[in-house]
Image (cartoon, grey):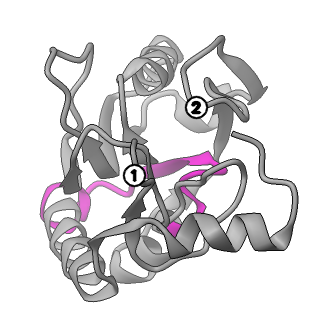
Amino acid sequence: MTTRNREETQSILDTADLLFSEAQCEEALARMAAEITRDLGHSYPLVLPVMGGAVVFTGKLLPLLRFPLDFDYVHVSRYGDKLEGGNFSWTRAPQDKNIAGRDVLILDDILDEGQTMRVIKEQVMAMGAKSCKTAVFANKLLDHEKPITADYVGLDVPNRYVFGYGMDVSGAWRNLSAIYALKGH
């Protein structure tokens, strides 16, 4: 899918199905923050979001984590601008000096097939992390097993092409405060 102009991009949203409202998303976020605080609030963890999908989730979650933490980020892409998975591309890998001996929390927008999160977690553990937890705002419900499950999940979403709350459709609509699904997907 290629979005060419403002009208086509607006049409994507206008014809989409609303799956989770802003209020439902905020409630899920608050629950996740409480769970993460319960488990990691004592450990001074390194929070490692996956850019750019995790930017909205991270920006909303961090102020709710009322404990000291360090922050870094990684940028790895599996999808690019395609609707189906492809090869991994590391734009910014984890930094060794920040990870060794640390409790790490990886944040991402969605756990789809699970390959991206699996690769990142394996890399973090190979770099000497003491522990590695994963948190995703959306977990896509698939009819087969994934290679990894997230430790913290905001919302379970159907096996459709979803966007909003950091997840994009052809690069657009990450900025929505609710979650939508494409018509027919």
Q: Work out whether residue 20 or residue 15 is closer to the camera in this orientation and state it.
A: 15
Q: Is residue 120 visible?
A: yes
x and y percentages locating residue 184 in the rendered image: 39, 45
Mark 2 lies on residue: 83
From the image, state whether disc 2 or disc 1 is nearer to you: 2
Tell whether position 175 is magenta: no
Q: Work out whether residue 44 or residue 5 is closer to the camera in this orientation and state it.
A: 5
Q: Amino acid at mark 1?
A: Pro
Q: Secondary structure at mark 1?
A: loop
Return the residue found at the far bottom. Answer: 23
Return the residue found at the far right. Answer: 5
Q: Is residue 23 above or below residue 49?
A: below
Quarter holding the C terminus is: top left
Q: What residue span does the magenta drawing correspond to?
A: 37-56
Q: Amino acid at mark 2?
A: Leu
Tell whether position 44 is magenta: yes
